[in-house]
Image (cartoon, rainbow, N blue to C red):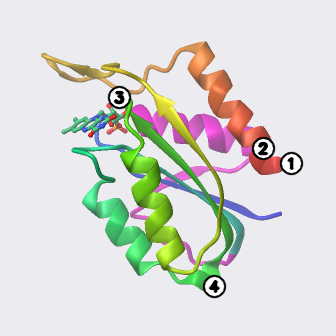
């Protein structure tokens, strides 16, 4: 099974989650600036949630995807708590005719967003374990 992992991350949380996920899947996580050139059996998209939506760059990336490049997709979103990122990415993929097999929301509260700026990317072992559980579902 070929797997491609792409992520969008402003503050580092989603990048950290994508890297944990990709490592568990034995592949490299790449930012969405890296196009999906070869068709993948599984495309995993990881994105943050901003003002009740996925990031505009993520939406544009999904909009530009060739449906033939992904047999099916999985979605991982990080968020303080809302499902808007997961739901937005899932709907955009489905609108492209790409089946979303499963999704995972990593709820982080205010983690990584401080008054002194963004310091994301420091996931706890429990958070990494939950991401690895999602990776195990993808592999199954
Ligand atoms: C400008 C901004 C808007 C946000 N809006 C939401 C939101 O609507 N819902 C939510 O649950 N989290 C929201 N968050 C929290 C982020 O989704 C969360 O910190 C996420 O892990 C950020 O990912 P990143 O560090 O990869 O950019 C927001 C964060 C920022 C900075």
Looking at the figure, which quarter contains the N terminus? Answer: bottom right
Circle 4 SS class: helix
| Image-based side of 100 in relation to 58, left or right | right
Identify the mark nearer the N-term, 3 or 1. Answer: 3
Extent of the magenta region: 12-39
What mark, if any, has residue 137 been given in the picture?
Answer: 2
What mark, if any, has residue 80 been given in the picture?
Answer: 3
Q: Is residue 27 magenta?
A: yes
Identified at 72% across, 41% down, the residue is: 135
Distance from disc 2 to disc 1, alpha carbons, whole Å, reads 5 Å
> For mark 4, what is the residue?
68
Identify the mark nearer the N-term, 3 or 4. Answer: 4
In the picture shown, does residue 24 fall above or below 122? Answer: below
Mark 2 close to ligand 1, CB under 8 Å = no
3 or 4: mark nearer the eye: 3
In the picture shown, does residue 25 fall above or below 58? Answer: above
- x%, y% of residue 133? 73, 32
- x%, y% of residue 98? 60, 75
């Amino acid at each position: 099974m070929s797997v491609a992992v792409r992520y969008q991350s402003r503050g580092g949380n989603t990048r950290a989650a994508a890297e944990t996920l990709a490592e568990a899947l034995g592949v490299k996580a790449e930012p969405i600036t890296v196009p999906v050139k070869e068709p993948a059996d599984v495309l995993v998209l990881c994105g943050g949630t901003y003002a009740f939506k996925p990031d505009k760059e993520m939406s544009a990336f999904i909009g530009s995807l060739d449906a033939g490049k992904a047999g099916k997709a999985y979605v991982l979103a990080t968020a303080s708590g809302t499902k808007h990122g997961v739901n937005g990415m899932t709907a955009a993929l489905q609108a492209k005719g790409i089946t979303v097999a499963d999704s995972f929301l990593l709820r982080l509260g205010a983690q990584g967003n401080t008054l002194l700026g963004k310091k994301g990317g420091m996931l706890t072992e429990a958070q990494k374990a939950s991401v690895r559980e999602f990776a195990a579902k993808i592999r199954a």
